[in-house]
Amino acid sequence: RKEVEQDPGPFNVPEGATVAFNCTYSNSASQSFFWYRQDCRKEPKLLMSVYSSGNEDGRFTAQLNRASQYISLLIRDSKLSDSATYLCVVKGGEYGNKLVFGAGTILRVKS
Amino acid sequence: DVKVTQSSRYLVKRTGEKVFLECVQDMDHENMFWYRQDPGLGLRLIYFSYDVKMKEKGDIPEGYSVSREKKERFSLILESASTNQTSMYLCASSKPSKRHSYEQYFGPGTRLTVT
């Protein structure tokens, strides 16, 4: 079983749609959670951290469910520029200071 | 502006060759990392370093070694390249970890093909 699992997609959505990605992690001692974004043929970049109480950054909302060991990312009012691969990332517990990456979920927003 | 640079964007090498991948960061970060990224597998950690001359094995160190002689530079070495090392190699750096403000900054990647 992979340590961080994501639905690879692709998710094909029209502009303006709301789309949600989920991610599950296997290490219950994980302490920190993040979403990274990777554009085609580019390097990953931090999109947002995920806090226990949930957090929002503009059109993006991240949620954490420790009991079920899953993380979600909700994107409202999708833009063409949101097309990318979204990587779920966990840190802490037995991973220490290392980041453990999911394989990513591909989002394609179409006009 | 944060910057991590890698010596090559594309590299083609023959089986058995020794390959050097260089990474330089200009942010005075203590931590540096080497990953490889393959379709369906995501990023996998090869080696990392928390300080000059210090190195730690990641999840897939076999067939690789690293060198960190200066704080800003972290090199990945393939002692004898094999076709299964064909991949995208990404270098990253970060400050020491803080729980929720931890961010790794990535270089643009080197796509290595071993023939």
Image: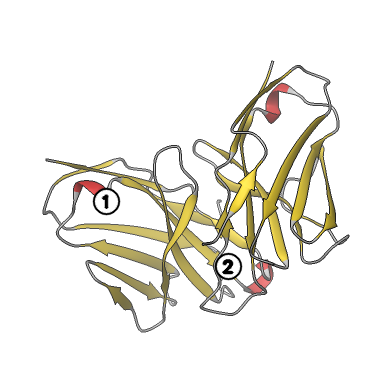
Residue A27 bears which disc, if any? 2
Q: Looking at the picture, how far across and down is residue A80, in whole percent?
A: 20, 46
The chain to which mark 1 is attached is: A
Task: Pick the residue in front: B47 or A5.
Answer: B47
Q: Looking at the picture, how far across and down is residue A8, in whole percent?
A: 38, 44
Q: Mark 1 points at which residue?
A: A82
- Left-right relation of A12 to A105: left
The chain to which mark 2 is attached is: A
The crowding category of the residue bearing disc 2, from other C-alpha atoms within 10 Å (few below 14, some 14 to 19, many at least 20), is some
Label pair 1/2, CB-CB below 8 angstroms: no
Total numbered circles: 2
Query: Element under label 2?
Result: loop
- Residue A13 versus residue A50 in the image, above or below: above
Q: Which of marks 1 and 2 is in front?
A: 1
Say if labels 1 and 2 share a chain. Answer: yes
Q: In which quarter of the image is the C terminus of chain B?
A: top right
| N-term mark: 1 or 2 | 2
Q: Residue at x 25, y 48 (%)?
A: A81
Give the colour scheme of this rendering.
secondary structure
Task: Pick the residue in front: A93 or B26.
Answer: B26
Amino acid type, residue under disc 1 in the picture: Asp
Amino acid type, residue under disc 2 in the picture: Asn
